Amino acid sequence: MVSSSEAVRERVGRKGGGGNGSEGVRKLLLGLGFLVQGFRCFPWMAVNFFLKDGLKVDPSTLQILQCSANLPMVAKPFYGILSDSFYIFGQHRVPYIAFGAFLQAVSWIAIFLSPSNISFFTITLYLLLGNLGASVVEVANDAMVAELGKPPSSSSKNSPNSSSGQVQSFVWIAASVGGVLGNLAGGIAIDRFSSQVMFLMFGILLSIQFLVTIFIHESSLDLPKSPSDRGIKTQLSELLVALRKPEIYYSILWFAASYAMIPALTGTMFYYQTEHLGIESSVLGISKVFGQAAMLLWGIIYNKNLKSMSPRKLISAIQATMAVFMFLDFLFVKGVYRMFGIPDSLYVVLFSGLLEVLYFFKILPFNVLMAQLCPPGCEGSVMAFLMSALAMAVIISGYLGVVLSSFVQVTANDFSGLGHALLIQAACTLLPIYCSSCIPDGVKAKTKPKEG
């Protein structure tokens, strides 16, 4: 006898048999997945205020926790290889998404159920569990995006990018919408609810994602076929072969280094804005909404106008723009804008949120490039390795930021050295541009050899 859930999955699978049906189910699964991924800023805004006001941690400790919580992201290649080679009930993407959503729901609801004087060690463990689930979901989602975003092997030279980048832009927009909603809701909720209630809200959202996912069968997604009998050793060897390709190896190396060598000052700036300047949480929320709206606009502009542009030139331009915005932050800390009558809150809304998301603007064109370079059959492994390298780079960047803050003697009560730290940060941001030749200019379309 067939259970009701199996019947629902069967009906969904039959619906997805057609092109329009499968596209609709794909958009539901990926759209919801990346929307929730973008909405993760909602509970993390609560985490920042909970640690600052509830547990009374200092800026360096806050930033260390923010970075250390990303450690599960470093193991993404393992999750990717597992997803590529180990099928669960004939599926190798959807079950991992459901499992990751379940882990996240458990972690955030556990934080909600914990006492308000929860220890720093305990909340760190819960956040690590939540990020473990998030990383598993991201690996499965990124693998599907890479599979669906590969250009046709026989596309003509005149239209090599006709379909490439559309899936990436769709999920980018979904994540940006989630970010806008998460920051807007977070800025409002942080003044009306306790941080732990916000943790519960996000846990409920993750539970909904889990329930939706378990009723979708992978056959309804019409994903590109890949062999299901390859073991982990085969996947690992194929990943190593792919990483030996200079265009992939050097690109990932440059991309990771371009993040790792920039000392992040997110924790310090958060304390500077909230403690030193007295910026209200609602203003910070609006600032982040403005930044996420810029991310959304960036996805639309890239999809319509910039896909054909050289990835090297585009990514280098973004890197240089980041350095310019860091110099604007230096002027902000020095009080230059106040001399012209510009309130601190206005600058925070217009520029601080934009600088935060500028860090991630180059991910979209780079993901499109890597999807084109990625060998068939190991998309999950290669994209997971890329995200792992990015996670490790962000962790290193955060630790360097703690070292830099200590070097210029920035504390929770003394921000006199913050200007010098921002100038050093801007200089470090410009350095990777001199090695941007590591990034390919693009991927040449493959054409079938003429017969006879």
Image: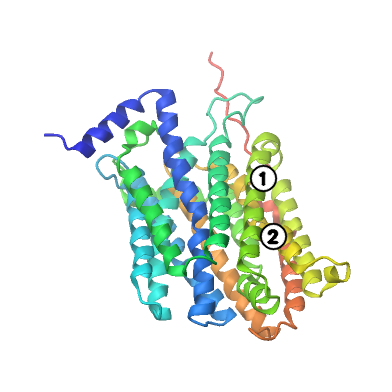
Which quadrant would residue 120 be assigned to in this image?
bottom left
Q: How many marks?
A: 2
In the rendered image, the vertical position of residue 447 relative to residue 296, given as above or below: above
Q: Amino acid at mark 2?
A: Leu
Q: Nearer the viewer, residue 184 or 221?
A: 184
- Point 46% across, 69% down: residue: 194
Q: Relative to residue 384, is residue 154 drawn left or right?
A: right
In the rendered image, the vertical position of residue 5 relative to residue 332, given as above or below: above
In the rendered image, the vertical position of residue 258 relative to residue 150, given as above or below: below
Q: Position of residue 138 (x, y in %)?
A: 45, 52
**Which label number is shown at residue 355?**
2
- Point 65% across, 51% down: residue: 361
Label 1 sits on a secondary structure element that is: helix
Label 2 sits on a secondary structure element that is: helix
- From mark 1 to mark 2, how far is it between C-alphas? 13 Å
Q: Position of residue 44 (x, y in %)?
A: 50, 65
Q: Amino acid at mark 1?
A: Trp
Is there any visible trace of residue 136 in the rendered image?
yes
Q: Relative to residue 180, is residue 115 drawn left or right?
A: left
Screen quadrant of the C terminus: top right
Q: Relative to residue 404, is residue 238 drawn left or right?
A: left
Screen quadrant of the N terminus: top left
Q: Which residue is mark 1?
A: 298
Q: Nearer the viewer, residue 268 or 166?
A: 268
Is there any visible trace of residue 241 in the rendered image?
no
Crowding around mark 1 (Cα neighbors within 10 Å: few <14, some 14 to 19, many 20+) is many
- Point 55% across, 22% down: residue: 449
- Point 82% across, 74% down: residue: 335
Q: Position of residue 289 (x, y in %)?
A: 62, 55
